[in-house]
Amino acid sequence: MELDIVDLSRLQFAMTALYHFLFVPLTLGLSILLAIMETVYVMTNRKIWRDMTKFWGVLFGINFALGVATGIVMEFQFGMNWSYYSHYVGDIFGAPLAIEGLMAFFLEATFVGLFFFGWDRMSRIGHLIATWCVALGSNFSALWILIANGWMQNPVGAAFNPQTMRMEMTDFAAVLTNPVAQAKFVHTVSAGYVTAAVFVLGVSAWYVLKGRHIELARRSMTVAASFGLAASLSVVVLGDESGYLTTSHQKMKLASIEGMWETEAAPAPFSIIGFPDQEARETHFTVQIPWVMGLIGTRSLTTEIPGINDLVVEAESTIRHGILAYDALERIRSAGNGTVDGEAEAIFEKNGYALGYALLLKRYVDDPRTATEEQIRQAALDTIPPVAPLFWTFRVMVFLGFFFIALMTTFFVLAARRRLTAHPWLLKVAVFSIPLPWIAAEFGWIVAELGRQPWVIEGVLPTALAVSNLGASSVLLTLLGFVAIYTILLVIEVKLMVKTIRKGPQVHGAEHPRSTLPRATADAPIAPQPSPTHTA
């Protein structure tokens, strides 16, 4: 029953996080695109750029509201479902969350109101500043959240205090500059930029195919293609950086993503496809590219990437050191206040890094010091995350990343040649590509979070020990309630988005909302039309 509570608590947090992250990427990317569009409006004073900013701003507002509503619940879950986690690391984890709430959220929320209601009450420069503050607030919000999440992946700047039995912060600057957190931040926001670029590109392509709002759609596509090309290239580059850091801090995750059970000679190959078999502990029918994984993971031709089996052996050794640390900790605690057990403190100082590995034995025995050899071996095997889901979700994510580069490059070239409307089939590809960035983003989070199991904090606190002491029925009931409510909210958002897109922008200028240009078809593509407002 205890494990059922753990699984249900994990599932509840996973579902609420995945629902919430349906809204986050579009908010991050659209906020920047709005600021870019309004900047062009202020520089050129062309009303069509104001119309663009207002139209995409409405879609941003719908998405922003749903993102806030779903995000608030996630922070409460730390106290409801993960109370021991909050007790154990609250001193470190709570700091970036508090800063996110006090600084980024209020900055973002305050200026959102000015963005929507300040068009006729503020100067153009003043409103532009408010729009950029919305964009910066959105990205600052993501920064602090990802600093907290990055610390869970690489817990730096903190140490375990045997007297309080908690992790305590020792270096706030180290938490802020955690390389894993910084890499996750730039990679995540870049993915959000790609999401918004594909969304704007696809919706604009739909308008062109329908023969509506041609001039506005062309400009939107040009901005989206330029912004999206830079963002999609950065996603791949920053993803490479994340892979390099994973080699140093989460070796088991990297080996599982690759389905690499045995350590291979450097530089290791990259498996394009394969079928991991966790029971047999091998990957069948692999098709590999030589050297690629070694170059990504180590950036050298001579450094090996350890395989899963070797990492299990290493984990078994670390568990034994953890048992020594656990025994020393019990001796320190039993000595009482004011009594110093120098030998125990020396043992703990030497082996304390492995205490979390001893806690993996809590799944099998109350006191890790009484664990059998078989239980130690089983706990070491528990450090292997689900290999097949990691293997395939990572490859789908990578494939989509390169697809976005190709898509954005194509439309960037067409925009430079002023041929955006010349190929209706490409416009249709853009329309059907709209949901793909969300699939890539969700798969990215699955790779990140599933890959660090069985840890809620890498190497420090096992997931199974972090949950609250709740009944399984209570967790199941709230899980079903959250899924039902979030599904309703998602349906509402999609309907509002579709309704707004079908209605189209409120154009104030020479162009009629429904253009007199013919619809684009395979037989009669829309040719560029000469217009005094064709360029910015």
Image: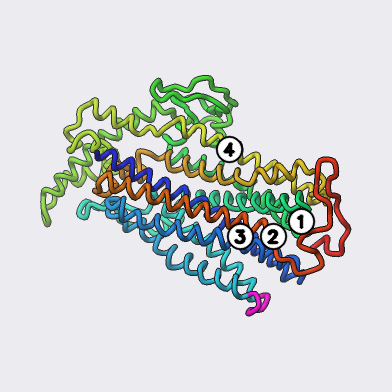
Q: Residues within 10 Å of mark 1 (few under 14, many from 20)?
A: many
Number of residues whose C-alpha sits closer than 10 Å to that of mark 3, classed few (under 14), some (14–19) or many (20 or more): some
The residue indicated by pointer 2 is 504
- The amino acid beneath tag 3 is Leu
Give the prevailing secondary structure in the magenta stretch.
loop
SS of the residue under disc 4: helix
Instruction: Please give the label number shown on residue 398.
Output: 4
Mark before the other along the chain sequence, 1 or 3: 3
Of marks 3 and 4, the one in the foreground = 3
- Is residue 347 in the magenta section? no
Sequence-earlier tag: 1 or 2: 1
Mark 3 vs mark 2: which is more N-terminal?
3
Q: Residue at x 36, y 44 (%)?
A: 10
Q: Earlier in the sequence, mark 3 or mark 4?
A: 3
Report the side of 281 relative to 200 (left or right). Answer: left
Checking the image for residue 59, the label placed there is 3
Q: Are marks 3 and 2 in contact (CB under 8 Å)?
A: no
Asked whether, in this view, residue 425 is left or right of residue 74, the answer is: right
